[in-house]
Amino acid sequence: MGAPNLRVARIEPFQMETLFEGAVTCGASDLYIKPNSFPVVRIQGRLEVLTDQYGLITSEIIEGILVSELDEMSLHALKQQRTFDFSIERPGVGRFRVNASLSRGEWVLAIRVIGVSPLSLGELNLPLDLEKFTHYQRGLVLISGKAGSGKSTTIAALLNQMLLNQDRHVVTLEDPIEYKYWPNKGMVTQKELGRDVVSFADGLKSALRQAPDAIFIGEMRDRETIEAALVAAETGHLVFSTLHAGDAPGVIHRILAAFPNQQHEQVRRQLASNLMAVISQRLVPAAKASGVIPAVEIMVVNDRIQELIRNAERTHEIVHAIEEGFVNYGMQTFDQSLFSLLTSSLIDYNTALNYASRPADFELRCSGVKADDGNKWIQFDLEADASPDRFKVQVKPGDFRPPEFKRGKAPAKASPKSRSMRKKRGLFSW
């Protein structure tokens, strides 16, 4: 049975405009539209049904949205594939990434709220040191995390930083195009999957002939795309991409899983030679305000990590190499990131413990007791003591209760524009 035909529906334009504006104003991250249901928004991870402001959504309204927003080629792809991703822009309101799919034979929409333009690393409360990755001349830089962890937002901040401050040509391959960039020094060419290129792999091969300084691939989702990305990095290009993986070791295993076993040794060598950094992130609830804040793991590929990537029996040691690389290489694990957020009063103790990779070890450290591998954090602890930007846990001998922390330095004061955006979209724009 094929997908249902799309009928041209007559809907009042202000209905959708008002719904989009309402989603942005209330700080929603997602908007769900289903036939014979009220609109539903997701605010700080919780679902809220909009029963008062808007009426029931009908199939005709949803079909009208699809017909008005998609061209003939996209409508054909939607009916053939029964699912389709596209973006909608409403001037003065924002941009929205839309996934259309079928449920019980009727079209439903899952809509992600996107900002009008990328925010800065500081506005997103990301480590400012991430900017150094935009100055690399070659290699592969990956941003990983589960769905909804803010990967697209982070990569947009990095690319925007590059385009504002560096004289470089950036080619993006996206599905769909989310953010629009307004370069200051650089130049950007944005291509959309299905509209401008057939696939990420084909788009990447074409991009190599367009003299790019940096390439962004929306997602390394299959073997062909991963192979093309590695080739681009090997030929001297700087390649950014995203991957669904929980942490840096997970990135290595996820990439290897796309290849047959007999190719793993070759892929490991390619990764060791061309992977430059992995940024992994989790969004955790902020302490004293509505919103979320990113906990960020940073792996910089040095000689030691190259060896651990090449050696299948030692890849599990990567997390310890990251811990020990805090001072000299600017690396940090998720637990070290959570520890910094906790001592800066940006998250509370229970949140840090719930999101820690190794909760038992994290609890011991917060209680003033080092775990068996506690020496891996020695440099991190010394840096925390010496730096005015970090704060030490205050624990009395023998006190194993969740400690109290000195209040950390307040985040940099936001500009009036960014404060206005946060008021509309929540504390942190993810």
Image (cartoon, rainbow, N blue to C red):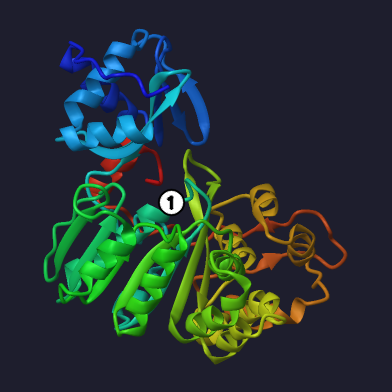
Instruction: Work out which residue is located at the far front of the displayed protein and give it.
Output: 1
Q: In the rendered image, which residue does mark 1 sit on?
A: 150
How many numbered marks appear?
A: 1
Residue 129 visible in the current orientation: no
- Give the x, y percent position of residue 50: 41, 16
Q: Is residue 409 above or below residue 287?
A: below
Residue in the foreground of this view, choosing between 194 and 308: 194
Is residue 134 among what the camera can see?
A: yes
At 37% from the left and 24% from the top, the residue drawn is: 3
Residue at (25% x, 61% y) in the render: 172
Q: Residue furthest bottom?
A: 303
Residue reaching furthest to the right: 398
Depth check: give the residue in front, 214 or 395.
Answer: 214
Residue 222 position within the rendered picture, expressed as x and y whole percent measured from the top left = 45, 59
**Quarter of the image holding residue 162?**
bottom left
- Within 10 Å of disc 1 (Cα), the crowding (few <14, some 14-19, many 20+) is many
Location of residue 115 in the rendering, given as x and y in whole percent from the top left corner: 28, 44
361 relative to 74, above or below: below
Report the side of 313 relative to 196 (left or right). right
Considering the image in quadrants, where does the N terminus appear?
Answer: top left
| 32 lies above or below 296 | above
Classify residue 405 by image quadrant.
bottom right
Q: Secondary structure at mark 1?
A: loop
Q: Residue 362 vs residue 193: left or right?
A: right
Q: Which residue is more in the foreground, 397 or 289?
A: 289
In terms of depth relative to the viewer, which is nearer, 180 or 331? 180
Residue type pointed to by label 1: Gly
Residue 68 position, x and y percent, is 17, 25
